[in-house]
Amino acid sequence: MGELVFVGLGLYDEKDVSLRGLEEARTSDYVFAEFYTSLMTGLSLERLETVVGKRVAVVSRKTLEDDDGEPILQKAEKLKVAFLVPGDPLIATTHIDLRIRAQKRGIKTKIVHGASIVSAAIGLSGLQNYRFGRSVTIPFSEPHSVYETPYNVVAENKARNLHTLCFLDIKAEEKRSMTIEEALKILLSLEEKKKMHIVTLDSLAVGIARAGAEDSLVKADSVKSLLNYDFGSPPHTLVFPAERLHFVEADALVKLAGAPESVKNMAR
């Protein structure tokens, strides 16, 4: 029987893939990749193919979601196939679904994990991993409607004194990636509607840009200040800390993320 190997590419460019992942790709009969679930701004397909030593066929969201990944699964039924994915391959639900489909068809599957924005953003924020609650994606607003779930998740986590990691929407087909400014404006519009004092101009937030790149940037401050802060090019990520901080977290936000000294008043 064939084999499907999911390989995480990491965060920034083709040099982030692990040695194990590189070996699996090089020994595969076919190599596929997707780049719609996350931005790897430093990656070049030409350089990736040089590193792997094989042609890399790029598949779209349609191939994996509408076509159920059939082009990949058909090859993997009798041959070894590597599927290269930004970050860690199983963070996106689509790829879990693809693995289940492969298993049901008797195709052996293997995972080679890669660096994920989940661990990277949490680490860069200076906040403690075990104090994060449910994470959430902030999607682009549709005409005449704003998705309320991100606001509600931040509210639920704050009520439990937990931090919130917010992924920002990506529309790869349109070459659009949400910025921190856009995300904050969406949440402020929901605050104006719901008036729960969850995300206000005075709320503390942490903006993270280009995690994994040499020019990655982390800035903690009030929402009002972050709205006018130049984070540079995407990908961007947003974190809302809990109402009370551990003293080490407060110190990290000040020393590592440039937060105002007043943040130390939030420490217990």
Image (spheres, rainbow, N blue to C red):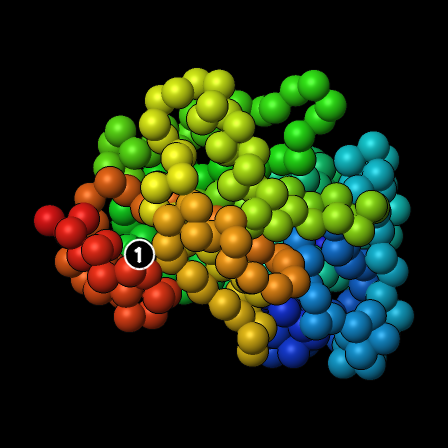
Q: Position of residue 136 (x, y in %)?
A: 49, 37
Residue at point 79%, 42% (across, down):
61
The kind of secondary structure element at disc 1 is loop
Residue at point 43%, 52% (across, down):
225
Residue 94 sits in which quadrant?
A: top right
Residue 199 vertical position relative to residue 250 in the rendered view, above or below: above
Residue 137 sits in which quadrant?
A: top right
Residue 166 vertical position relative to residue 195 in the rendered view, above or below: below
Residue 246 vertical position relative to residue 201 in the rendered view, above or below: below
Q: Position of residue 52 (x, y in %)?
A: 77, 77
- The amino acid sitting under disc 1 is Leu
In this view, the residue in front, 171 or 232, is: 232
In this view, the residue in front, 195 or 147, is: 195
Q: Position of residue 84 (x, y in %)?
A: 72, 61
Q: Which residue carries the number 1 mark?
A: 127
Residue at point 60%, 43% (across, down):
182
Q: Is residue 200 shown left or right of residue 23?
A: left
Q: Residue furthest left?
A: 268
Q: Is residue 244 shown left or right of residue 130?
A: left
Label 1: how many Cα within 10 Å (few below 14, some 14–19, many 20+): many
